[in-house]
């Protein structure tokens, strides 16, 4: 009998004690009519917004933050996060949630650098959108109609005096044993899509002593060096949407062989985050209205006039009526 009573007491204690001290077991799903707060009312984690470490990345990242906040979506600012490889891996791993990427980079994310599909704006976008969803559960939202392609810029004085207007002319100048020193990011100098692709297509080679490699992908830095002739630099990594080119007296060299893919900026987001905040897509629709001229102008305010990226982003969005 004692054993039975003890067993009963143990059962009673086991049933009552968790209610007194709490339990680590997950709560049961609420039944119909339950007073438990619905999931939709539970605060959700802020969306972590990142960008690459360049002028336009900072601008677009700040636009994303402003537009999401405007739609009631909380954010954490991780803009100027790192180069492409770092930001991309952070998104895939879930360390960040959203950042502005470029459609043409899909050629290298998915090992298709030789496919001509990336030189067609719509076809390239459709391809990377499909592949990234299938392989990484990442969603590409609406792209901007501005081709921010990689290129090389030189001082206008050099361009005019030596009649260098294109990469064909530039290659001939280099192969004529003329003095050239180019500054670019590590990514630009080593990525198969950038300088190596230009060298292969236009048949020129820059030696290591003709290169200055910097860690940042910020073209404001590279273009300033070419404009000032810093350490003998007379050529610089540049982007098609850079606003500082004209202001710094630089010429963006034409790419008649169409070596570069089309690089349209586009917010990309983890699908799980989009599921938690379905209004992200419509909130960021204004990003898709940014054309080449607009981006050059906004980038110039940051790179040339020294304005803060967040201030430039908000001022533009307010001017266009995109912010409340």
Image (cartoon, grey):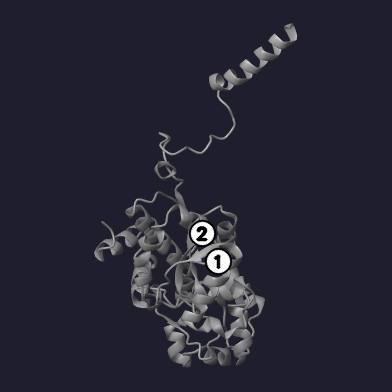
Per the model, the C-alpha gap separating discs 2 and 1 is: 8 Å
Q: Where does residue 77 sit, x and y in percent of width and height? A: 44, 52
Left or right: residue 96 compared with residue 323: right
Rendered position, 96 above or below 43: below
Quarter the C terminus occupies: bottom left
The image quadrant where one finds the N terminus is: top right
Q: Secondary structure at mark 1?
A: helix
Mark 1 crowdedness (10 Å alpha carbons): few <14, some 14-19, many ≥20: some
For label 1, the residue is 133
Is 104 in front, or is 247? Answer: 104
Disc number for residue 271 = 2
**Front residue of this view, candidates 35 and 187:** 35
Element class at badge 2? helix
| Left or right: 192 as drawn, with respect to 232 | right
The residue lying at 56 percent from left, 20 percent from top is: 21
Tell which residue pokes out farthest to the front in this image: 1
Q: Is residue 163 left or right of residue 13?
A: left
Residue at 61% over, 66% down:
135
* Residue nearer the viewer, 301 or 31: 31
Residue 221 in view (yes/no): yes
Q: Earlier in the sequence, mark 2 or mark 1?
A: 1
Which residue ends up furthest to the top in the rendered image?
2
User: Whole-percent x and y of residue 80?
Assistant: 48, 58
Give the residue displayed 41% in from the left and 45% down from the top: 40
Q: Is residue 234 visible?
A: no
Mark 2 neighbour class, 10 Å CA radius: few under 14, some 14 to 19, many 20 or more: some
Where residue 221 appears, as percent x and y from the top left, is 48, 67
State the residue at coordinates (42%, 70%): 142
> CB under 8 Å between callouts 2 and 1?
yes
**Place of residue 93 in the rendered image (x, y in percent of width and height, measured from the top left):** 60, 55
């Amino acid at each position: 009998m004692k054993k039975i009573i003890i067993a009963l007491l143990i059962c009673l204690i086991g049933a009552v004690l968790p209610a007194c001290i709490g339990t680590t077991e997950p709560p049961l799903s609420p039944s119909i009519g339950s007073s438990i707060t619905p999931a939709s009312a539970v605060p959700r984690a802020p969306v972590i917004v990142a960008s690459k470490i360049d002028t336009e990345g900072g601008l677009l990242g700040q636009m994303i933050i402003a537009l999401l906040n405007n739609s009631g979506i909380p954010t954490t600012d991780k803009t100027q996060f790192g180069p492409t490889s770092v930001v991309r891996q952070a998104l895939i791993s879930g360390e960040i949630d959203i950042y502005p990427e470029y459609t043409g980079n899909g050629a290298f994310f998915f090992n298709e650098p030789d496919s001509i599909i990336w030189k067609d704006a719509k076809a390239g976008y459709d391809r990377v959108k499909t592949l990234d969803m299938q392989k990484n559960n990442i969603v590409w939202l609406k792209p901007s109609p501005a081709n921010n392609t990689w290129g090389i810029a030189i001082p206008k004085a050099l361009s005019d005096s030596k009649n260098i207007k294109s990469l064909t002319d530039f290659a001939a100048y280099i192969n004529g044993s003329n003095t050239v020193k180019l500054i670019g990011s590590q990514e630009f100098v080593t990525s198969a899509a950038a300088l190596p692709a230009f060298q292969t297509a236009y048949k020129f080679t820059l030696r290591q002593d003709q290169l200055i490699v910097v860690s940042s992908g910020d073209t404001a830095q590279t273009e300033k060096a070419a404009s000032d002739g810093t350490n003998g630099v007379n050529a610089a990594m540049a982007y098609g949407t850079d606003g500082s080119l004209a202001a710094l007296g630089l010429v963006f060299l034409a790419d008649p062989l169409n070596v570069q893919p089309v690089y349209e900026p586009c917010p990309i987001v983890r699908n799980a985050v989009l599921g938690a905040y379905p209004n992200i897509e419509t909130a960021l629709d204004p990003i898709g209205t940014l054309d080449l001229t607009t981006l050059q102008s906004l980038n110039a305010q940051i790179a040339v006039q020294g304005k803060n990226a967040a201030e430039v982003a908000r001022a533009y969005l307010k001017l266009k009526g995109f912010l409340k």
